[in-house]
Image (cartoon, rainbow, N blue to C red):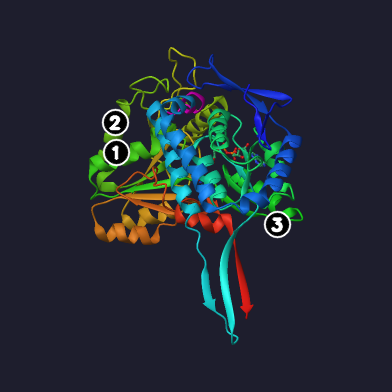
Amino acid sequence: MHGNLIGGQWCEASEVSENINPSDTRELVGLYARGGREDAERAVSAARAAFPAWSQSTPQFRHDILARAAQELATRKEELGRLLSSEEGKTLPEGVGEVGRASSVLSYMAGEALRVTGDRIAGLLAGSDVEVTREPLGVVGVVSPWNFPIAIPAWKIAAALAFGNTVVFKPAEIVPGSAWALVDILHRAGLPEGVLNLVMGSGSQVGGVLCSHPGVDAISFTGSVATGRRIAMDCVSGPVMKRMQLEMGGKNPLVVLDDADLDLAVECAVQGAFFSTGQRCTASSRFIVTDGIHDRFVRAVIERLKGLKVGHALEAGTHIGPVVDEKQLNVDLSYIDIGIKEGARLAWGGKPLDLPTPGFYLQPALFTEVDSSMRIACEEIFGPVATVTRVKNFDEALSVANATEFGLASGICTTSLRHATHYKRHAQAGIVKVNQATSGLDYHLPFGGRKASSYGPREQGQYAVDFYTVIKTAYTSA
Ligand code: NAD
């Protein structure tokens, strides 16, 4: 049994949860502790107790621990990639790639620990000197989703630790294995007790304590908009109004113009919408296609989809692994049903698949004749389901792309510099891609969205410091 880490000790919990492989539901990936409110409270106390010493530790000390952990992740990326793919269902190359990314993130953030700067500014009064410095926030609660079970925790935890904060980490219930492995590695890399605590358990119980506990100073959350809203209320309703960073859902458009390179557009569309089983917040689930290329684009996407193999995540040759669990599969299927009832045309796929191993397999689904007001074009499905909306011209494409409550990623395929430039300026999204899939982002660059997709400062890269530190302005007269 894999326990929770509280105050430097691995602890059992009164309940245990089974980690099941979505590629083969007969396979138990492992048994993991399922903590409750008391465990979360003990973890917060441990993180508070560890904060004074950790916040005063040298940047070199923090750097070395993160760098050691990065090294171990890199060395074990094949083994941990297998574990990740076994619990989440993304293909083995995607799983190994994600572990590699977590390693790179830790290594980058190790460097950031050494690069915290401040300003010295002349004051307005004679002889007054002003220093502007950054200090750690205190205890950070990290609440993460299931779809990137090691990369997202890594980029939150590494940034929090690099800048001198202590952490209580609550991973998503259905993917505890990658979370546990990451914490184990960081713990053995030399973190003092209580600096990083892991409490696996339910969102409402463990997550609920973190978001309302006065001993927690900030919450970094990634997940759905509904949970994000709930968390936001909890964060501000207690005696301490917590700093929060909420990264949430998306309904990301990919515009394809008549002048696009067709092969490239098809690649961007299929990569962005269906790989990782469409379970990426940056997945392009809405293709918005101008009239002159529409039919050729649809035909070519269907041809490409016919060549993709849906199968066991660990099997060589699989392009698309299973959906993460039965609940998400039912959501995907219910939206496919909604799309048909709304009058859209299911042009390809959308059927559950019976394969040799019992798993949650679904053919990627492509809807055409989709009006942008249909639910399948407005609501986040979070599965391998994409819609095609036909538009007259660039102006209509841009307006349909922006007509959404979300604003995470937005893409365009075009060979026109004028249209690409205009799109980059006017797309209402945190990330814009030209001639690239909307998903797949660099770890050293700022990440986040607008509108309902995001609340608070950006994650990752050198911008991460803005969330994980608080600025102090000190005036001195000698
Ligand atoms: P979710 O909102 O159901 O859960 C996310 C986390 O919040 C889990 O750890 C869950 O246990 C916890 N939680 C649930 N209720 C809580 C509560 N009341 N208090 C505190 N914590 C609580 O999301 P999910 O299903 O795990 O992930 C899928 C969603 O995540 C999608 O909407 C997707 O778009 C989004 N996502 C966004 C990004 C991004 O960076 N914008 C990245 C990945 C995933």
- Magenta residues (range): 84-90
Residue 140 locus on image (x, y percent): 63, 48
Point 41% across, 36% down: residue: 100
Q: Residues within 10 Å of mark 2 (few under 14, many from 20)?
A: few
Residue 232 visible here: no
Residue 470 point in image, percent of width and height: 60, 61
Decide whether the magenta segment is chiefly helix, strand or loop. Answer: helix
- Vertical side of 435 occupied by 197: above or below: above
Q: In the rendered structure, which disc, 3 or 2, sits on the residue that comes first in sequence?
A: 3
Identify the disc placed on residue 376.
none
Task: Give me the C-alpha separation between circle 2 and circle 1.
Answer: 9 Å
Alpha-carbon neighbours of circle 3 within 10 Å: few (<14), some, or many (≥20)?
some
**Would you name the residue on which mark 3 appears?**
241
Residue under the point 74% across and 25% down: 14
Q: Earlier in the sequence, mark 1 or mark 3?
A: 3
User: What is the number of the mark on residue 304?
Assistant: 2
Q: Note whether residue 311 is visible.
A: yes
Horizontal and vertical percent position of residue 411: 36, 49
Which quadrant of the figure has residue 306? top left
Residue at the outermost bottom position? 126
> As displayed, is residue 150 above or below residue 1?
below
Q: Residue at x 58, y 36 (%)?
A: 187
In the rendered image, which residue does mark 1 sit on?
A: 267
Q: Amino acid at mark 2?
A: Arg
C-alpha separation, residue under disc 3 versus residue under disc 2: 50 Å
**Mark 1: secondary structure:** helix
* Number of residues whose C-alpha sits closer than 10 Å to that of mark 1, classed few (under 14), some (14–19) or many (20 or more): some
Report the number of discs. 3
Task: Identify the secondary structure beneath mark 2.
Answer: helix
